[in-house]
Image (cartoon, rainbow, N blue to C red):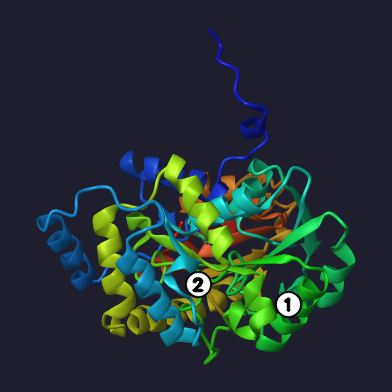
Amino acid sequence: MAIRLSERVRRITPSSTLAMDARAKQMQREGQDVVFFGVGEPDFDTPEFIKDEAVAALRAGMTKYAPAAGLADLREAVCQYLYKEYGLSYRPKNIVITCGAKHALYNVFQVILEPGDEVILPVPYWVSYSEQIKLAGGVVVPVMTTAANGFRMQPEDFAAAITPRTRAVVINSPNNPTGAVYSRAELLAIAEIAVRHDLVIVSDEIYDHLIYDGLAPTSIPTLGPEVAARTILINGVSKTYAMTGWRIGYAAGDEKVIAAMADLQSHSSNATTFCQKAAIKALLGPQEAVEKMRAEFARRRDLMVRLVRETPGLDCLTPQGAFYVFVDVGRLIGRTVAGETVRDDEHLAEIFLEKAKVAVVPGAGFGMPNYIRLSYATSCERIEEGFRRIKALLAGG
Ligand code: PMP
Ligand code: GLU
């Protein structure tokens, strides 16, 4: 018997970042030496004192269900953290703990969208937003950005995309996949438009601590009470503390929206109890490891940007945040690489993986073909090795 899948699930595309990672890891298991520029995941291990806290929590018997909205202590810790980092004054009732930031985003769209509601999404965007919006019955309204404007959505383009059906806008600064960082003034201009049109701002700030060139991140709710009231802030411990596998994220914002997200979780699932305990330690414990990792990412970024620019056929802007370089491969489309005429960015990514054993993510999944995304969450040695292979491949024709 062929079991028919639901229409809503048939309309989604599986995550290209995770698909590429699964393929590359499979090749590695088969004994191939793959360079991983694919998935965005810190290669560092979680700091030891955070792991110790999880072990202690397990030993203390924290093996039972946690409340659907998250441990009270962690919700309180998130409030303290957001106050310490940004001067934001949330109460625990404004915070819900989720299974990673991805889950927080999924839940937000589920609780705020009616079928047909439009969500404005600056392009390129992280692969999961578009599919999560569709799963919630929403309609994605893409707003293009260009390299010339640093891949940052221009306020006039944003305003022009708004219709009576627009319900929300997603802002992700620092951005995945471009590393673009919006200035406070730019965010204010966007937020003012959102206020004028009564839109929800979904602000994904997961890369706020991975920021370079002496820049400081702007948290959107700090732009004023009117902005804060309509912003759902998304963050988590995955990137900042190298805790991707722990699956702890959170959302902060309007009490009713947060309560609805917790109610939704009460019927699906919620974050692991002892991992939540460790997340408190991550947020409120010593922060030295964060700065060490950030400084290392900055070094890798400089190396990767130099290598991209040295490679004929490739070009990029200097990203100011996150750990990705978004590479323009437009000049390679139609050219012969490894004996094949390159059809598009997806084909090029395929050739890189098959012929050079370098995993990258095609731009198409981010809504911007003719680009590929390279993650520099890997060592300088592997970055050098990856580029030796890419250069050799491209030089070979
Ligand atoms: N937002 C962005 C922009 C991301 O790149 C990611 C990838 N991890 C997430 C959210 C999801 O984070 P988490 O691993 O905490 O689910
Ligand atoms: N967010 C990371 C990425 O874009 C991790 C994978 C995922 O969750 O999509 O590669």
Please name whichever residue, 99 or 258, is drawn nearer the observer in this view of the structure: 258
Tell me residue 393's x, y (percent): 55, 56
Tell me residue 174's x, y (percent): 58, 74
Residue displayed at 60% across by 78% down: 221
> Going by the picture, which residue comes out furthest to the bottom?
214
Q: Answer yes or no: disc 2 within 8 Å of ligand 1.
A: yes
Please name whichever residue, 148 or 97, is drawn nearer the observer in this view of the structure: 97
In the displayed structure, 182 sits above or below 241; it is below
Instruction: Identify the residue under disc 2.
Output: 207
Q: Is residue 395 visible?
A: no
Q: Quadrant of residue 318?
A: bottom right
Please name whichever residue, 69 or 30, is drawn nearer the observer in this view of the structure: 69
Q: Residues within 10 Å of mark 1 (few under 14, many from 20)?
A: many
Residue displayed at 86% across by 70% down: 159
Instruction: Identify the residue under disc 1.
Output: 191
Q: Quadrant of residue 69?
A: bottom left
Indicate the amino acid at tag 1. Answer: Ala
Q: Quadrant of residue 30?
A: top left
Indicate the amino acid at tag 2. Answer: Tyr
Residue displayed at 24% across by 71% down: 47
> Going by the picture, which residue comes out furthest to the left?
59
Q: Which secondary structure lies at badge 2?
A: loop
Left-right relation of 10 to 75: right
